[in-house]
Image (spheres, rainbow, N blue to C red):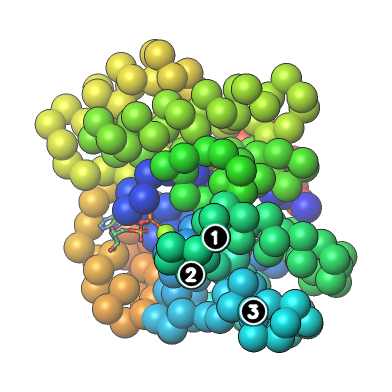
């Protein structure tokens, strides 16, 4: 099982990128599970025809803690197994705590053993990397972490924090920082700006994803680009990114 966490600042394009990677990997024949770890709870929306799925936290609240795997795992495009951790009631509870609870529930119900995914992708909000938001890089959940960033200062600031957090946990044998996905915002000299920042942050750019209106066109249909426009340049770009991540995570070995 390949376990990948995708971190980045809120709004940077984590869910868009992660969903397209999931869809591309599904097309390549992998059994994929995508777990949204963001109180926004819209990670898998474009794999589910534009609909938000009930979150693990919602279901736990409804069922007074009593849930089954069928309540919290939904099959989306390409049979991608979709899970949304969920968030707290605003003003009450801690956002990260929800992620911990959701992870504990998935384990308790043996989700990984029962579904046996080839690849698990965690889509994680990285504005603060503490508590629940640090879970995917700890305790063996993810093996490889990729950070989505643009050339914008705030995105790079978050990237720097995330990389630092991974390094702080790193000596304990947890997840590895495996590089950056540059999701272009078309800021001036974006590639150079990110490369310069990486001299301090560490790591390198795995792939550059261009900014393209086709993403919104697909989103308007409730779909990933891979599903809505499979022959587009953008779909090819996501597919090549997906293969690239798999190569990095497996050291080139076939899974
Ligand atoms: P996050 O999950 O990091 O909060 P989203 O994936 O929801 O961010 O993306 C935020 C917005 O940016 C979405 O409306 C999405 O359509 C847009 N977006 C993301 N990546 C691209 C891209 N490469 N080209 C065009 N629009 C993009
Ligand atoms: Mg998101």
Q: Position of residue 215 (x, y in %)?
A: 28, 65
- Under circle 1, the secondary element is loop
Judging by the rendered image, the residue that carries numbered circle 3 is 61
Looking at the picture, tell me which residue is in the foreground, 57 or 180. Answer: 57
| Residue 162: percent from left, percent from top | 49, 32
> Please, is residue 98 above or below residue 139 in the view?
below
Left or right relative to 218: residue 247? right
Q: Which residue position is annotated with label 1?
A: 93
Q: Quadrant of ligand 2?
A: bottom left
Give left or right: position of 214 versus 178: left
Of mark 3 and mark 1, the one earlier in the sequence is 3
Residue identifier under label 2 = 89
SS under mark 3: helix
Q: Are marks 3 and 1 in contact (CB under 8 Å)?
A: no
Cα separation, mark 2 vs mark 3, equals: 11 Å
Label 2 close to label 3 by CB (< 8 Å): no
Are the two marked residues, 2 and 1, in contact with CB atoms closer than 8 angstroms? Answer: yes
The secondary element bearing badge 2 is classed as loop
Residue under the image location 32 percent in, 53 percent down: 11
Label 2 beta carbon within 8 A of ligand 2? no
**Residue 235, horizontal then vertical, whole percent:** 38, 61
Q: Give the CA distance from mark 3 to mark 1.
A: 13 Å
Distance, label 2 to label 1, CA atoms, is: 7 Å
Tell me what residue is drawn at x 77 percent, y 60 percent.
Answer: 104
| Mark 1 neighbour density, 10 Å: few (under 14) some (14–19) many (20 or more) | few
Please identify, in this view, whether the residue under mark 3 or under mark 1 is nearer the observer: 1
Residue occupying the far left of the picture: 188
């Amino acid at each position: 099982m390949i376990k990948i966490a995708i971190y980045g600042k809120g709004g940077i394009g984590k869910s868009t990128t992660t969903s397209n990677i999931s869809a591309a990997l599904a097309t390549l024949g992998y059994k994929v599970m995508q777990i949204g770890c963001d109180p926004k709870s819209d990670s898998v929306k474009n794999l589910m025809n534009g609909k938000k799925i009930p979150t693990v936290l919602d279901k736990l609240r409804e069922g007074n803690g009593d849930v089954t795997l069928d309540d919290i795992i939904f099959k989306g495009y390409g049979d991608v197994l979709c899970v949304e951790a969920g968030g707290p009631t605003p003003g009450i509870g801690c956002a990260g705590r929800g992620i911990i609870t959701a992870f504990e529930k998935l384990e308790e119900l043996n989700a990984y053993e029962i579904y046996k995914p080839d690849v698990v992708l965690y889509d994680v909000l990285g504005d603060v990397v503490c508590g629940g938001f640090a879970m995917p890089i700890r305790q063996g959940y993810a093996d490889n972490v990729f950070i989505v960033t643009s050339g914008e200062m705030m995105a790079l600031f978050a990237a720097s924090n995330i990389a630092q957090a991974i390094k702080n946990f790193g000596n304990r044998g947890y997840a590895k920082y495996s590089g950056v996905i540059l999701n272009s915002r078309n800021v001036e000299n974006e590639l150079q700006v990110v490369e310069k920042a990486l001299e301090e942050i560490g790591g390198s750019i795995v792939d550059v994803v261009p900014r393209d209106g086709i993403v919104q066109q697909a989103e308007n249909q409730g779909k990933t680009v891979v599903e809505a426009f499979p022959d587009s340049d953008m779909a090819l770009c996501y597919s090549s990114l997906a293969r690239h991540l798999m190569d990095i995570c497996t050291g080139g070995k076939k899974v």
